């Protein structure tokens, strides 16, 4: 299926990411579906047609983790591109708008396409084998929220 498929797309998909802090801890999720199945990352997902970006961020956070946050701030925009090693063909391409916010309510629990959740202190993040981009946007978000 060309165009409508997230796998082998004919255009980038808009993804929304959330960097959520509870004190010094940041919320991490273990992916339960491709892309990056089994890897730790930030909660988020695809924006729906007609949905505002901030509404998508709040919806994804509720669906994936069951929590709510306060005011959202723009943290970063990231291109997440996965290619086939043999051919170089683009398998996934997301342009991700990352928002940051502070936890407001709810108990974080895995939902939707998330296999596990964790609140990680800065000194614990290395244990989650996060991509350099996740470390970068979390640092940007920490600075943004003060």
Image (spheres, grey):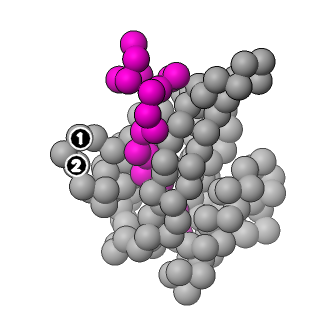
Image position of 53 (left or right of 124): left
Q: Is residue 80 above or below residue 132?
A: above
Q: Which residue does the image show at 27% across and 41% down from the upper left?
A: 48
Can residue 40 be seen here?
A: yes
Camera-side residue: 100 or 66?
Answer: 100
Label 2 belongs to which residue? Answer: 51
Element assignment for label 2: loop
Q: Is residue 9 magenta?
A: yes
Residue 69 in picture, x, y percent from top left: 37, 66
Give the numbered dot on residue 118.
Answer: none
* Marks 1 and 2 close (CB-CB < 8 Å): yes
Mark 2 Cα shell of 10 Å, populated few (<14), some (14-19), many (≥20)? few
Furthest residue toward bottom:
146
Q: Which residue does the image show at 70% across and 62% down from the upper left?
A: 135
Q: Is residue 7 magenta?
A: yes
Label 1 belongs to which residue? Answer: 49
Magenta extent: 1-21
Furthest residue toward left:
50
């Amino acid at each position: 299926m060309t165009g409508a498929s997230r796998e082998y797309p004919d255009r980038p998909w808009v993804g929304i990411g959330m960097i959520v802090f509870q004190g010094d801890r940041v919320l991490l999720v273990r992916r339960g579906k491709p892309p990056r199945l089994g890897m730790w990352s930030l909660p988020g997902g695809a924006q729906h047609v007609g949905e505002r970006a901030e509404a998508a961020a709040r919806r994804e956070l509720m669906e994936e983790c069951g929590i709510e946050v306060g005011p959202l701030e723009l943290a970063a925009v990231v291109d997440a591109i996965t290619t086939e090693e043999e051919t170089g063909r683009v398998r996934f391409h997301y342009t991700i708008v990352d928002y940051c916010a502070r936890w407001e309510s709810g108990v974080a629990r895995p939902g939707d396409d998330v296999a596990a959740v964790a609140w990680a202190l800065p000194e614990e993040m290395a244990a989650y084998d996060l991509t350099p981009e996740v470390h970068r946007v979390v640092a940007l978000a920490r600075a943004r929220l003060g």
